Amino acid sequence: MRKIILGLPKGSLQEATFAMMRKAGFEVSGGERSYMPRINDAEITARLIRAQEISRYVELGVLDAGITGYDWIVENGSDVVEVAELVYAKQGLRPVRWVLAVPQDSDIRCAADLEGKRIATEAVGLARKYLAERKINAEVEFSWGATEVKAPELADAIVELTETGSSLRANNLRIVDTLLESTTRLIANRAAWADAGKRAKVEQLAILLKGALAAESRVLLKMNVAADRVEQVAAILPSLHAPTVSAIDAEGWAAVESVVEEAVVREIIPRLKAAGAEGIIELPLNKVIP
């Protein structure tokens, strides 16, 4: 059996990851305090670990594979195989950013102004690399949490992770610079990746997760169209390749369907109707595999 040990992120990415796994066909369950969740696949043993640590354990071989942020791979300097990029975060389908932020009334306007200052962050390695590249001498101290409230009393600036910027604004902070843009990654241990059986399982997981993610922003549109209007309707429909056109029992009519971005549906449905489409149905999708 090609069994793998998979690290799943505990913390801010946990809920979104479990939802994505579920959509990919993997039910993950377990108690709220459990670090060994159950998964409905006999070939996967799951471990719930903080995202900050997963790349280290994958590199060491304690885990065969894991889901974590690119930022923590960089922060830990982990030598792992990046199998797939999965663009989702805690609140949406977008990258997150590590930013340099300061109080609104701070005199710090650019990186050079950090000379001799104190910076609080959880990503100490990332911050020190940023300073070293710019030949800036500043003190970087590890923050155990609630980093946003540490400026200006405990630190002159912070380096913090943000998705929407709402927490920074709520704490009266402004962004000075972006240090790193990060997305979620499926990673593998190099020895496990060299094992044909384990690699096949990790690749299966990658295909299904990418398919589930691709389906998040897409829907299936189905409609009936008079034969002499098919070309006009098809020209309106965006699709992965081309809309699917099938004959139906009613003479002179065809069934047309296409996978489209959900964001454009409200714009194109009136156009489809005007072009002659009838019985238009919009359906959600679980996976889209190119």
Image: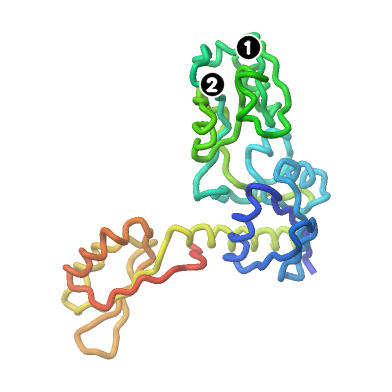
Camera-nearest residue between 7 and 161: 161
Where in the figure is residue 222, as x and y percent of width and height? 33, 74
Residue drawn 66% across and 68% down? Answer: 27
Q: Quadrant of the N terminus?
A: bottom right
Rendered position, 134 above or below 235: above
What secondary structure is found at the residue carrying circle 1?
A: loop
Mark 1 vs 2: CB contact within 8 A: no
- Residue identified by numbered label 2: 103
Rendered position, 19 above or below 100: below
The numbered mark at residue 283 is none
Rendered position, 135 above or below 219: above
Where in the figure is residue 91, as x and y percent of width and height? 53, 49
Residue type highlighted by circle 2? Pro
Cα distance between the residues tagged 1 and 2: 23 Å
Q: How many marks?
A: 2
Residue drawn 26% across and 61% down? Answer: 268
Quadrant of the image occupied by residue 224: bottom left
Residue drawn 77% across and 47% down? Answer: 58
Residue type highlighted by circle 1? Lys
- Residue identified by numbered label 1: 135
